[in-house]
Amino acid sequence: MANVLLLGAGASRGTLGECAPVSKEFGKQVTTVTKWTEEYPYLAVAIQFLSQRITDTSLKSWALDKVWGAIDTRVKLQHIWGLCLPGAPFPHIVKGVQRNDWDPWGIAGFQLVCLVARVYGDDLKDKIKTAAEGNGSVKTGLDKLEGGDCVISFNYDLLAERILDKLRKQWASANRYYQPAHGDDKILLCKPHGCLSWKGHFPEKECPVEILKYPMPEGDIHPEVHPCLTAPVPFKSEIIDWALQLSLVPTFFHLLVAQWGFAIEYLSKAERLEVMGYGFPPEDLHAHYLFAEAAAKRGKNKKLQIEVYETCEQRFDKVKREIDKIFSPSGCSYSCEYKGEVKG
């Protein structure tokens, strides 16, 4: 296990352009969706409500991580704040079905998942196909990988999968049954935030997660069947509330846990880490713990070469500070170098 390629939203943004927004650009990109406030009314009302509580937030411009995190927090702290959402439509209509047993904040979160599927799934299919044919930074990085290496993608889209297929690389998705063997000829793909191609039933009952070859179209999504995603929020119910998850969605729980577990294992043994468009955001505490655990497991003798692709050197300086916060406490040996921007 010599190499790990880490992909963040900036990798897709640099490869695909404005149609694949990073978190802070998400709200602006959504304004290109005709009458989005009418198509996603609960989400629109929630953002209007949150605009008085989160800086730089309005219906015309909002950050995906901040809004998703705020919605998640309102639900988790409902016994403090309650679940009232002033201005939310009533009766509650979810995908054409009246669901008055759902709270308006929960519906806002569900509509956000639908919008994520639209922006990073439906709207990117053609762009990703073109990128797989090209010679951008992500394709170059993936082409360097060999059996026993690992890709960790925090993105919901299928850019990495499509390019790996185009390169005719042998790869496998992380799951609880995966057994890395000595001399393994496959590249392992870990997606700690889930993927738009993971079709889940909520609750699962007799329907385990199905891994599709394509992102779930927004039109196929409804409250009981939707992509298995986890938000970039500080406390992810999908992996920390294990008793509830095992009773309702056991295969999704085990699938998601495998992504995080294998990511830590491969990072702890890597000789080279290539980071493309990922800024180690403080909002994602679990990811910070993941990297810190991997750094601690490395010990002090095995050196890690970190290469960072970012939009500019000023941005690199910010990312390096986050890297230092994660890797310095463990005392592990590492170097960090700026390699330029991600290009399509």
Image: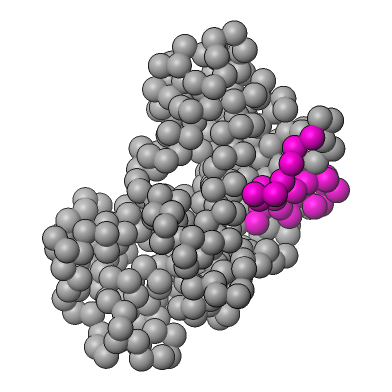
Q: Position of residue 309 (x, y in %)?
A: 57, 31
Q: Residue at x 72, y 65 (%)?
A: 213
Can see residue 209?
Answer: yes
Horizontal relation, residue 106 to residue 300: left or right: left
Q: Position of residue 240 (x, y in %)?
A: 40, 50
Can see residue 119?
Answer: no
Query: Which quadrant would the C terminus be assigned to in this image?
Result: top right
Horizontal relation, residue 187 to residue 317: left or right: right
Task: Name the colour scheme.
Answer: one colour
Q: Position of residue 147 (x, y in %)?
A: 81, 35
Q: Residue at x 72, y 46 (%)?
A: 178
Q: Residue at x 79, y 35 (%)?
A: 181
| 181 versus 63 height, above or below | above
Horizontal relation, residue 169 to residue 195: left or right: right
Query: Which quadrant would the N terminus be assigned to in this image?
Result: top right
Q: Position of residue 304 (x, y in %)?
A: 60, 18
Residue 167 magenta-highlighted: yes
Residue 192 magenta-highlighted: no
| 97 versus 150 height, above or below | below
- In the picture, residue 269 is in which quadrant? top right
| 124 versus 2 height, above or below | below
- In the picture, residue 187 is in which quadrant? top right
* Viewer-side residue, 126 vs 174: 174
Q: Which residues are magenta?
A: 158-181
* Viewer-side residue, 291 vs 175: 175
* Viewer-side residue, 179 vs 112: 179
Furthest residue in direction top, as rendered = 301
Q: Residue at x 73, y 33 (%)?
A: 149
- Count all numbered tags in the image, as a single digit: 0
- In the picture, residue 201 is in which quadrant? bottom right
| 171 versus 225 height, above or below | above
